[in-house]
Amino acid sequence: MKQLFITSFFVLLILKSQGQVTKGNWLVGGNAIFSSAHYKSDATANANLLTIGINPKIGHFFIDKFAVGLMANYSFSHTKISSSSQNFTTFTFGPYLRYYFLSPKSRVNILGETGYQYGIEKGSGNNDYKTNGVSFAAGPVVYFNSTVGIEFTIGYSILKYINHNNTNNNLQIAIGLQVHLEK
């Protein structure tokens, strides 16, 4: 009986909801990000990298379904190479573009997003790196009501280390909560 009630509640919530992705509205929220990678190289030993992070965002809808904004990212990475390990913290910020593909009245929508980030990565051995990169993400968003939506995205990021010949490519899974502030 409890499962039937919970299922009915969420179905009604979804049926009565719609997102506010129209011109003049603001978007405030963020994502929690998880990424895991395994590197193989002939020159060095195999490496495993685990990253978790948060990604706050603010944006404005200049036209229906299209938002432009600023995002930041703070992440913690743990790298294990053979028997040694190293920790990194990364802070990046930059602009992003977001587009919603379905009608502004949709209770469930599909989003696509791209962004550019510039930042600093600090390692546990006094290793500091300046970085820049791009990211791409897409996925569904489900609206709880006319203002709040939860989104599930899968994305890809390319992070280039400035003054070094290193690049970090990651597949990312994220879950986020966005609040659409009406005009």
Image: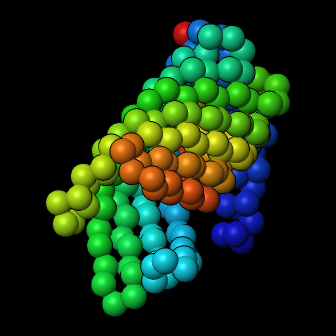
Q: Residue at x 55, y 49 (%)?
A: 158
Q: Residue at x 44, y 30 (%)?
A: 94
Taking the view exactly as shown, the residue that stands out farthest to the right is 102
Question: Does 32 sit above or below residue 15?
Answer: below
Q: Position of residue 124 (x, y in %)?
A: 21, 66
Judge from the rendering whether residue 57 lies leftward or rightward of residue 61; answer left or right. left
The N terminus, quarter of image: bottom right
Q: Position of residue 12 (x, y in %)?
A: 75, 45
Quadrant for residue 118, please give it: top left
Q: Residue at x 37, y 64 (%)?
A: 77
Q: Position of residue 74 (x, y in %)?
A: 35, 48
The C terminus, quarter of image: top right
Q: Residue at x 62, y 51 (%)?
A: 156
Viewer-proximal residue among 183 and 69: 69
Viewer-proximal residue among 24 and 85: 85
Q: Determine if residue 108 is in view.
A: yes
Q: Position of residue 107 (x, y in %)?
A: 76, 36
Taking the view exactly as shown, the residue that stands out farthest to the left is 126
Q: What is the total number of numbered labels drawn onto the structure image?
A: 0
Question: Does 92 sit above or below residue 157?
Answer: above
Question: Does 59 sit above or below residue 144?
Answer: above
